[in-house]
Image (spheres, grey):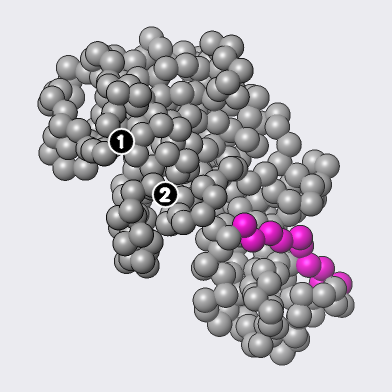
Amino acid sequence: MTRGTTPGPPPGPGRRGARFPLRLRRPVPWASQRPTWRDAKPALISDALKRACARPSGNWYVLGASRDIGRRKQPFGRNVGGTEVIAWRDASGRLTAGSGICPHLGAPLRESRVHCGTVVCHWHGLALDGEPFAGWEPYPAHDDGVLAWVRLDALGGEEPTPKPVVPERPASGAVDSVYSAVGICEPEDIVANRLDPWHGSWFHPYSFVDLTVLSTPADGDPAQDDGFAVDVSFKLAGRVVVPVRAVFSAPEPRTVVMHITEGEGRTSVVETHATPLAPDARGRPRTAVVEAVIAVSERPGFAAARAAAPALRPLMRLAAGRLWRDDLAYAQRRWQLRSTGRFPG
Protein backbone atom coordinates (compact mmCIF):
# COMPACT_ATOMS: atom_id res chain seq x y z
CA MET A 1 0.00 0.00 0.00
CA THR A 2 1.53 3.28 -1.04
CA ARG A 3 1.48 6.13 1.44
CA GLY A 4 2.95 9.61 2.37
CA THR A 5 5.38 11.57 4.60
CA THR A 6 5.36 13.53 7.88
CA PRO A 7 7.89 15.94 9.48
CA GLY A 8 11.15 14.37 10.58
CA PRO A 9 12.42 10.85 9.95
CA PRO A 10 10.59 7.97 11.63
CA PRO A 11 12.56 5.57 13.83
CA GLY A 12 14.42 3.20 11.52
CA PRO A 13 13.54 -0.49 11.68
CA GLY A 14 17.07 -1.25 12.83
CA ARG A 15 16.34 0.60 16.08
CA ARG A 16 12.96 -1.01 16.67
CA GLY A 17 12.96 -3.53 19.47
CA ALA A 18 12.18 -7.06 18.40
CA ARG A 19 10.24 -7.71 21.60
CA PHE A 20 7.86 -4.76 21.43
CA PRO A 21 6.62 -4.00 17.90
CA LEU A 22 4.26 -1.22 19.03
CA ARG A 23 5.27 2.42 19.41
CA LEU A 24 3.61 5.52 20.81
CA ARG A 25 3.65 8.34 18.30
CA ARG A 26 3.59 12.07 18.95
CA PRO A 27 0.40 13.44 17.35
CA VAL A 28 1.02 15.52 14.22
CA PRO A 29 -1.94 17.52 12.86
CA TRP A 30 -2.85 16.53 9.31
CA ALA A 31 -2.25 20.06 7.96
CA SER A 32 1.19 20.21 9.66
CA GLN A 33 2.66 17.36 7.63
CA ARG A 34 5.50 18.14 5.29
CA PRO A 35 4.14 18.52 1.74
CA THR A 36 5.29 15.69 -0.51
CA TRP A 37 4.37 17.05 -3.93
CA ARG A 38 7.95 18.09 -4.74
CA ASP A 39 9.16 14.53 -4.14
CA ALA A 40 6.31 12.92 -6.05
CA LYS A 41 7.71 13.86 -9.44
CA PRO A 42 5.27 12.92 -12.23
CA ALA A 43 8.13 11.79 -14.48
CA LEU A 44 9.46 9.45 -11.80
CA ILE A 45 6.08 7.77 -11.38
CA SER A 46 5.49 7.70 -15.13
CA ASP A 47 8.87 6.09 -15.82
CA ALA A 48 8.25 3.41 -13.20
CA LEU A 49 4.85 2.74 -14.77
CA LYS A 50 6.37 2.44 -18.25
CA ARG A 51 8.92 -0.10 -17.02
CA ALA A 52 6.18 -2.11 -15.34
CA CYS A 53 4.05 -2.11 -18.49
CA ALA A 54 7.04 -3.33 -20.53
CA ARG A 55 7.55 -6.43 -18.39
CA PRO A 56 6.09 -9.73 -19.63
CA SER A 57 2.93 -11.12 -18.08
CA GLY A 58 2.72 -14.32 -20.11
CA ASN A 59 -0.93 -13.35 -20.80
CA TRP A 60 -1.99 -14.29 -17.25
CA TYR A 61 -4.85 -12.49 -15.47
CA VAL A 62 -6.03 -12.79 -11.88
CA LEU A 63 -9.62 -13.97 -11.59
CA GLY A 64 -10.10 -13.76 -7.84
CA ALA A 65 -9.49 -15.56 -4.57
CA SER A 66 -8.64 -19.23 -4.93
CA ARG A 67 -10.91 -20.18 -2.03
CA ASP A 68 -13.91 -18.49 -3.69
CA ILE A 69 -13.86 -20.86 -6.64
CA GLY A 70 -15.66 -24.11 -5.98
CA ARG A 71 -17.59 -22.97 -2.93
CA ARG A 72 -20.88 -22.54 -4.76
CA LYS A 73 -22.78 -24.84 -7.07
CA GLN A 74 -22.25 -22.36 -9.89
CA PRO A 75 -18.97 -21.70 -11.69
CA PHE A 76 -17.09 -18.49 -10.95
CA GLY A 77 -17.65 -16.07 -13.84
CA ARG A 78 -15.79 -12.95 -14.92
CA ASN A 79 -15.61 -10.97 -18.16
CA VAL A 80 -11.90 -10.32 -18.60
CA GLY A 81 -11.27 -7.62 -21.17
CA GLY A 82 -14.37 -8.64 -23.15
CA THR A 83 -13.71 -12.39 -22.87
CA GLU A 84 -16.31 -14.32 -20.89
CA VAL A 85 -14.49 -16.71 -18.56
CA ILE A 86 -15.76 -19.33 -16.14
CA ALA A 87 -13.71 -21.22 -13.56
CA TRP A 88 -14.61 -24.16 -11.33
CA ARG A 89 -13.14 -27.21 -9.59
CA ASP A 90 -13.21 -30.55 -11.35
CA ALA A 91 -13.90 -33.81 -9.52
CA SER A 92 -10.33 -33.89 -8.17
CA GLY A 93 -10.46 -30.26 -6.97
CA ARG A 94 -8.24 -28.97 -9.76
CA LEU A 95 -8.88 -25.42 -10.96
CA THR A 96 -10.42 -25.49 -14.43
CA ALA A 97 -11.27 -22.53 -16.68
CA GLY A 98 -12.72 -21.92 -20.10
CA SER A 99 -15.05 -19.86 -22.23
CA GLY A 100 -18.18 -18.64 -20.50
CA ILE A 101 -20.23 -19.06 -23.70
CA CYS A 102 -22.01 -22.36 -24.20
CA PRO A 103 -21.04 -23.81 -27.63
CA HIS A 104 -24.62 -24.99 -28.22
CA LEU A 105 -26.72 -21.82 -28.28
CA GLY A 106 -24.58 -19.30 -26.40
CA ALA A 107 -25.99 -19.61 -22.88
CA PRO A 108 -24.07 -17.76 -20.14
CA LEU A 109 -22.29 -20.63 -18.44
CA ARG A 110 -21.62 -18.59 -15.31
CA GLU A 111 -25.34 -19.10 -14.52
CA SER A 112 -25.13 -22.86 -14.99
CA ARG A 113 -24.49 -25.54 -12.36
CA VAL A 114 -21.46 -27.55 -11.31
CA HIS A 115 -22.32 -31.21 -10.71
CA CYS A 116 -19.61 -33.71 -9.70
CA GLY A 117 -16.89 -31.47 -11.16
CA THR A 118 -18.73 -30.91 -14.46
CA VAL A 119 -20.39 -27.70 -15.66
CA VAL A 120 -23.93 -28.48 -16.81
CA CYS A 121 -25.58 -25.79 -18.95
CA HIS A 122 -28.89 -24.65 -17.50
CA TRP A 123 -30.45 -24.11 -20.94
CA HIS A 124 -30.24 -27.59 -22.47
CA GLY A 125 -28.04 -29.67 -20.16
CA LEU A 126 -24.83 -29.74 -22.21
CA ALA A 127 -22.07 -30.97 -19.88
CA LEU A 128 -18.45 -29.74 -19.94
CA ASP A 129 -15.76 -31.53 -17.94
CA GLY A 130 -12.91 -29.19 -18.85
CA GLU A 131 -11.83 -30.99 -22.01
CA PRO A 132 -12.42 -29.53 -25.50
CA PHE A 133 -15.92 -30.27 -26.74
CA ALA A 134 -18.04 -29.09 -29.69
CA GLY A 135 -15.96 -25.96 -30.24
CA TRP A 136 -15.64 -25.13 -26.53
CA GLU A 137 -12.03 -24.79 -25.45
CA PRO A 138 -10.52 -24.67 -21.96
CA TYR A 139 -8.09 -21.90 -20.96
CA PRO A 140 -4.86 -22.55 -19.07
CA ALA A 141 -5.51 -21.96 -15.37
CA HIS A 142 -3.23 -21.68 -12.34
CA ASP A 143 -4.01 -21.86 -8.61
CA ASP A 144 -1.18 -20.44 -6.49
CA GLY A 145 -2.92 -21.26 -3.23
CA VAL A 146 -4.18 -17.71 -2.68
CA LEU A 147 -5.29 -16.48 -6.11
CA ALA A 148 -6.75 -18.08 -9.22
CA TRP A 149 -5.31 -17.08 -12.61
CA VAL A 150 -6.35 -17.64 -16.20
CA ARG A 151 -4.23 -17.30 -19.34
CA LEU A 152 -5.86 -15.51 -22.26
CA ASP A 153 -3.43 -15.48 -25.16
CA ALA A 154 -5.74 -13.70 -27.63
CA LEU A 155 -6.29 -10.86 -25.17
CA GLY A 156 -2.72 -10.54 -23.89
CA GLY A 157 -0.98 -10.90 -27.24
CA GLU A 158 2.35 -11.75 -25.62
CA GLU A 159 4.52 -14.84 -25.69
CA PRO A 160 2.64 -17.22 -23.34
CA THR A 161 4.35 -18.67 -20.28
CA PRO A 162 3.52 -21.90 -18.42
CA LYS A 163 2.79 -20.05 -15.16
CA PRO A 164 2.04 -16.47 -14.10
CA VAL A 165 4.55 -14.19 -12.42
CA VAL A 166 3.67 -14.89 -8.78
CA PRO A 167 5.58 -12.64 -6.34
CA GLU A 168 7.74 -14.13 -3.60
CA ARG A 169 5.62 -14.91 -0.54
CA PRO A 170 6.22 -16.08 3.04
CA ALA A 171 7.44 -19.66 3.08
CA SER A 172 4.74 -20.99 5.40
CA GLY A 173 2.41 -20.22 8.28
CA ALA A 174 0.78 -17.12 6.76
CA VAL A 175 -2.75 -15.79 7.10
CA ASP A 176 -4.13 -14.56 3.78
CA SER A 177 -7.12 -12.48 2.78
CA VAL A 178 -8.31 -11.32 -0.63
CA TYR A 179 -10.32 -8.16 -1.32
CA SER A 180 -11.85 -7.27 -4.68
CA ALA A 181 -13.51 -4.12 -6.04
CA VAL A 182 -14.28 -2.63 -9.46
CA GLY A 183 -13.55 0.87 -10.71
CA ILE A 184 -14.05 2.94 -13.87
CA CYS A 185 -10.43 3.06 -15.01
CA GLU A 186 -7.75 1.01 -16.71
CA PRO A 187 -5.18 -1.29 -15.08
CA GLU A 188 -2.42 1.30 -15.52
CA ASP A 189 -4.35 3.72 -13.30
CA ILE A 190 -4.37 1.15 -10.48
CA VAL A 191 -0.67 0.45 -10.95
CA ALA A 192 0.18 4.17 -11.07
CA ASN A 193 -1.63 4.66 -7.76
CA ARG A 194 0.54 2.00 -6.16
CA LEU A 195 3.73 3.43 -7.69
CA ASP A 196 3.09 6.74 -5.91
CA PRO A 197 4.48 6.16 -2.40
CA TRP A 198 4.04 9.80 -1.36
CA HIS A 199 0.29 10.17 -1.05
CA GLY A 200 -0.40 7.89 1.90
CA SER A 201 -0.39 9.98 5.04
CA TRP A 202 -2.16 12.79 3.18
CA PHE A 203 -4.79 10.63 1.54
CA HIS A 204 -5.08 7.84 4.17
CA PRO A 205 -4.28 9.50 7.52
CA TYR A 206 -6.59 7.06 9.31
CA SER A 207 -4.24 4.16 8.48
CA PHE A 208 -0.71 5.41 7.77
CA VAL A 209 1.62 7.95 9.33
CA ASP A 210 5.30 8.89 9.34
CA LEU A 211 6.04 7.65 5.85
CA THR A 212 9.47 8.48 4.48
CA VAL A 213 10.57 7.41 1.00
CA LEU A 214 14.10 6.07 1.46
CA SER A 215 14.95 5.34 -2.15
CA THR A 216 13.35 5.36 -5.58
CA PRO A 217 14.26 3.65 -8.87
CA ALA A 218 15.91 6.90 -9.96
CA ASP A 219 18.47 6.48 -7.18
CA GLY A 220 20.00 3.63 -9.16
CA ASP A 221 20.28 1.27 -6.19
CA PRO A 222 20.32 -2.24 -7.70
CA ALA A 223 19.46 -3.71 -4.30
CA GLN A 224 15.99 -2.17 -4.57
CA ASP A 225 15.25 -4.08 -7.79
CA ASP A 226 13.57 -1.05 -9.40
CA GLY A 227 11.42 -0.53 -6.33
CA PHE A 228 10.45 2.21 -3.89
CA ALA A 229 11.73 1.64 -0.32
CA VAL A 230 9.82 3.34 2.49
CA ASP A 231 9.60 3.56 6.26
CA VAL A 232 5.99 3.74 7.40
CA SER A 233 3.92 3.28 10.54
CA PHE A 234 0.59 1.48 10.48
CA LYS A 235 -1.93 3.03 12.85
CA LEU A 236 -3.66 0.72 15.29
CA ALA A 237 -5.50 2.95 17.78
CA GLY A 238 -4.90 6.46 19.06
CA ARG A 239 -1.15 7.05 19.29
CA VAL A 240 -0.25 3.36 18.92
CA VAL A 241 1.53 2.49 15.66
CA VAL A 242 3.55 -0.38 14.17
CA PRO A 243 6.59 0.89 12.24
CA VAL A 244 7.98 -1.19 9.37
CA ARG A 245 10.15 -0.88 6.30
CA ALA A 246 8.63 -1.89 2.97
CA VAL A 247 9.60 -2.07 -0.70
CA PHE A 248 7.11 -1.56 -3.54
CA SER A 249 7.83 -3.13 -6.92
CA ALA A 250 5.98 -4.09 -10.09
CA PRO A 251 6.96 -7.58 -11.30
CA GLU A 252 4.59 -7.46 -14.29
CA PRO A 253 2.25 -4.95 -15.99
CA ARG A 254 -0.82 -5.48 -13.80
CA THR A 255 0.73 -6.17 -10.40
CA VAL A 256 2.34 -4.09 -7.66
CA VAL A 257 3.72 -5.81 -4.56
CA MET A 258 4.59 -4.43 -1.15
CA HIS A 259 7.15 -6.56 0.68
CA ILE A 260 7.73 -5.95 4.39
CA THR A 261 11.51 -6.17 4.66
CA GLU A 262 12.10 -5.03 8.27
CA GLY A 263 10.01 -4.75 11.40
CA GLU A 264 6.91 -6.59 12.54
CA GLY A 265 5.58 -9.02 9.94
CA ARG A 266 8.86 -9.24 8.02
CA THR A 267 8.40 -11.16 4.71
CA SER A 268 4.64 -10.39 4.69
CA VAL A 269 3.36 -9.11 1.35
CA VAL A 270 0.46 -7.15 -0.08
CA GLU A 271 -0.19 -7.93 -3.76
CA THR A 272 -2.33 -5.56 -5.79
CA HIS A 273 -3.52 -7.04 -9.08
CA ALA A 274 -5.46 -5.15 -11.74
CA THR A 275 -7.64 -7.16 -14.14
CA PRO A 276 -9.34 -5.43 -17.08
CA LEU A 277 -13.06 -6.15 -17.38
CA ALA A 278 -15.65 -5.52 -20.06
CA PRO A 279 -16.56 -1.83 -20.55
CA ASP A 280 -19.65 -0.49 -18.81
CA ALA A 281 -22.88 0.48 -20.62
CA ARG A 282 -21.35 3.86 -21.54
CA GLY A 283 -18.24 2.28 -23.04
CA ARG A 284 -15.98 3.29 -20.16
CA PRO A 285 -13.21 0.88 -19.13
CA ARG A 286 -13.66 -1.13 -15.96
CA THR A 287 -10.93 -2.74 -13.90
CA ALA A 288 -11.13 -5.20 -11.04
CA VAL A 289 -8.70 -4.65 -8.17
CA VAL A 290 -7.84 -7.95 -6.53
CA GLU A 291 -5.66 -7.36 -3.48
CA ALA A 292 -4.13 -10.24 -1.55
CA VAL A 293 -2.71 -9.67 1.92
CA ILE A 294 -0.41 -12.52 3.02
CA ALA A 295 0.62 -11.83 6.61
CA VAL A 296 3.09 -13.68 8.77
CA SER A 297 4.88 -13.09 12.06
CA GLU A 298 7.72 -14.76 13.92
CA ARG A 299 5.97 -14.17 17.25
CA PRO A 300 4.67 -17.29 19.06
CA GLY A 301 1.27 -15.67 19.50
CA PHE A 302 0.75 -15.60 15.73
CA ALA A 303 -0.33 -19.24 15.94
CA ALA A 304 -3.57 -17.98 17.48
CA ALA A 305 -4.05 -15.68 14.48
CA ARG A 306 -3.67 -18.61 12.11
CA ALA A 307 -6.23 -20.58 14.08
CA ALA A 308 -8.61 -17.61 13.94
CA ALA A 309 -8.02 -16.93 10.23
CA PRO A 310 -11.66 -17.50 9.16
CA ALA A 311 -12.76 -14.81 11.63
CA LEU A 312 -9.88 -12.48 10.79
CA ARG A 313 -10.36 -12.47 7.03
CA PRO A 314 -13.56 -10.34 7.06
CA LEU A 315 -11.75 -7.78 9.23
CA MET A 316 -8.77 -7.77 6.87
CA ARG A 317 -11.10 -7.27 3.91
CA LEU A 318 -12.86 -4.46 5.75
CA ALA A 319 -9.55 -2.63 6.27
CA ALA A 320 -8.59 -3.12 2.62
CA GLY A 321 -12.01 -1.90 1.50
CA ARG A 322 -11.65 1.34 3.42
CA LEU A 323 -8.35 2.08 1.70
CA TRP A 324 -9.63 1.10 -1.73
CA ARG A 325 -12.65 3.34 -1.45
CA ASP A 326 -10.16 6.20 -1.57
CA ASP A 327 -7.62 4.66 -3.93
CA LEU A 328 -10.23 3.75 -6.53
CA ALA A 329 -11.38 7.37 -6.48
CA TYR A 330 -7.73 8.30 -7.08
CA ALA A 331 -7.41 5.86 -9.99
CA GLN A 332 -10.76 6.82 -11.52
CA ARG A 333 -9.85 10.50 -11.38
CA ARG A 334 -6.58 9.74 -13.13
CA TRP A 335 -8.39 7.88 -15.94
CA GLN A 336 -10.99 10.63 -16.27
CA LEU A 337 -8.30 13.26 -16.78
CA ARG A 338 -6.27 11.06 -19.11
CA SER A 339 -9.29 10.24 -21.26
CA THR A 340 -10.08 13.92 -21.77
CA GLY A 341 -6.49 15.05 -22.35
CA ARG A 342 -6.33 17.01 -19.09
CA PHE A 343 -3.96 14.84 -17.08
CA PRO A 344 -0.99 16.98 -15.96
CA GLY A 345 2.60 15.99 -16.35
Up/down of 250 relative to 134, above or below: above
In-front residue for pair 72/344:
72
Left or right: 114 as drawn, with respect to 331:
right
Q: Secondary structure at mark 1?
A: loop
Residue lying at 50% horizontally and 30% vertically, measured from the top left: 248
Residue 335 image point, x, y percent: 50, 33
The residue singled out by tag 2 in the image is 296
Give the residues in magenta: 135-144
Q: Reading the chain from its start, which is encountered first: label 1 or label 2? A: 1
Residue 60 image point, x, y percent: 70, 49
Q: Secondary structure at mark 2?
A: loop
Residue 230 image point, x, y percent: 41, 24
Is 140 included in the stretch rendered in magenta? yes
Residue lying at 34% horizontally and 15% vertically, measured from the top left: 36
The quadrant of the picture occupied by the N terminus is top left
Name the mark nearer the viewer: 1 or 2. 1
The residue singled out by tag 1 in the image is 18
Q: How many marks?
A: 2
Left or right: 281 as drawn, with respect to 302:
right
Up/down of 257 relative to 195, above or below: below
Residue lying at 42% horizontally and 49% vertically, measured from the top left: 296
Whether residue 188 appears in this view of the structure is: yes
Up/down of 9 relative to 70, above or below: above
